[in-house]
């Protein structure tokens, strides 16, 4: 036995003890699951959403590592004030979003402003505010943007949603380049259809549900738990060399 051989490599830690995280749209669904995943990995997590009662209840359920703050991320002056009053976060999960499925001929300007305003504009300026604080305080952190498989393919009745999520992918790649010299990583997660309070009404249509399941090669809808490991991974030292890319968690939808 060669006693002079170097020790084997050690797997980087997935733990987030001592780190702080911010999750937007955290009152329910994917946002709540993201917050839970980060808390379970040891992070101190601030949950934000527009509804005080919902976000407060969510934070209470997660225990002492979670706290709540009411914030409408589409209100940019409020976003600026929120970040100005606190230290930089180590991790941002840029999750707040919405969808208004309609064929292109039915889309209104109000629909456009609502979907692109939250999914893209708000996400952009939340990322900007978070990154500015990280840079100013020398924090080498991680931005995680909640994209979609619809940021990699097209979908009927989803011109607005696809526009916002494709744009989010491009935004992610570009800001990853801006932030790399500061040691800040930026990545997206691109899920397939996940059962959440927002999507559940869509699946009440048997034909729609069947069409979705026909494209998910693993044969089932996604669960929020399917995303939690990816969130912790991208936030942790285990993803230290990942930036400007997307984790597509789609059950094989985009493999064709």
Image (cartoon, grey):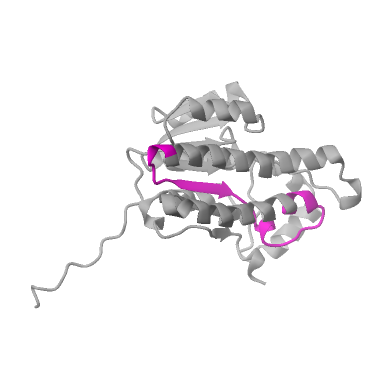
Q: Is residue 23 visible?
A: yes
Q: Is residue 96 visible?
A: no
Q: Nearer the viewer, residue 245 or 7?
A: 245
Q: Residue furthest right?
A: 105
Q: Nearer the viewer, residue 242 or 225?
A: 242
Quadrant (top left, top right, bottom left, bottom right) of the C terminus: bottom right
Quadrant (top left, top right, bottom left, bottom right) of the N terminus: bottom left
Q: Position of residue 60 (x, y in %)?
A: 47, 25
Measured along the vertical axis of the image, is residue 231 above or below residue 155? Answer: above
Measured along the vertical axis of the image, is residue 13 above or below residue 29? Answer: below
Measured along the vertical axis of the image, is residue 130 above or below residue 255? Answer: above
Residue placed at 39% from the left, 31% from the top? 65
Task: Using residue 224 as the reference point, say whether residue 6 is left or right of it.
Answer: left
Q: Nearer the viewer, residue 74 or 128?
A: 128
Residue placed at 49% from the left, 36% from the top? 22
Residue placed at 72% from the left, 64% from the top? 214
User: In this figure, what is the number of numbered marks?
Assistant: 0
Q: Is residue 148 magenta?
A: yes
Which region shows up in magenta? 136-162
Q: Position of residue 209 (x, y in %)?
A: 74, 54
Q: Position of residue 141 (x, y in %)?
A: 42, 45
Q: Residue furthest bottom?
A: 1
Q: Position of residue 49 (x, y in %)?
A: 59, 30
Residue 78 occupies quadrant: top right
Task: Using residue 36 as the reference point, say whether residue 10 is left or right of it.
Answer: left
Residue placed at 51% from the left, 32% from the top? 47
Q: Is residue 176 magenta?
A: no
């Amino acid at each position: 036995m060669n006693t002079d051989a170097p020790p084997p490599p050690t797997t980087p830690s997935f733990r987030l003890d001592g780190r702080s995280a911010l999750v937007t749209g955290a009152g329910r669904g994917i946002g709540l699951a993201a917050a839970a995943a980060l808390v379970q990995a040891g992070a101190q997590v601030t949950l934000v959403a527009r509804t005080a009662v919902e976000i407060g209840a969510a934070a209470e359920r997660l225990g002492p590592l979670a706290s709540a703050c009411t914030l409408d991320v589409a209100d940019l002056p409020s976003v600026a004030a929120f970040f100005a009053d606190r230290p930089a976060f180590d991790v941002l999960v840029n999750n707040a979003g919405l969808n208004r499925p309609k064929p292109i001929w039915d889309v209104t300007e109000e629909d456009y402003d609502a979907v692109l305003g939250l999914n893209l504009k708000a996400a952009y300026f939340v990322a900007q505010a978070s990154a500015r604080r990280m840079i100013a305080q020398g924090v080498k952190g991680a931005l995680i943007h909640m994209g979609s498989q619809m940021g990699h393919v097209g979908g009927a009745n989803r011109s607005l949603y696809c526009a916002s999520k494709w744009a989010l992918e491009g935004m992610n790649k570009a800001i990853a380049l801006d932030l790399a010299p500061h040691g800040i990583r930026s990545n997206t997660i691109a899920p397939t259809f996940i059962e959440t309070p927002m999507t559940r009404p869509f699946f009440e249509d048997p034909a729609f549900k069947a069409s979705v399941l026909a494209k998910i090669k693993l044969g089932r809808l996604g669960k929020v738990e399917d995303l939690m490991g990816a969130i912790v991974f991208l936030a942790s030292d285990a993803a230290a060399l990942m930036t400007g890319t997307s984790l597509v968690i789609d059950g094989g939808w985009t493999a064709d």
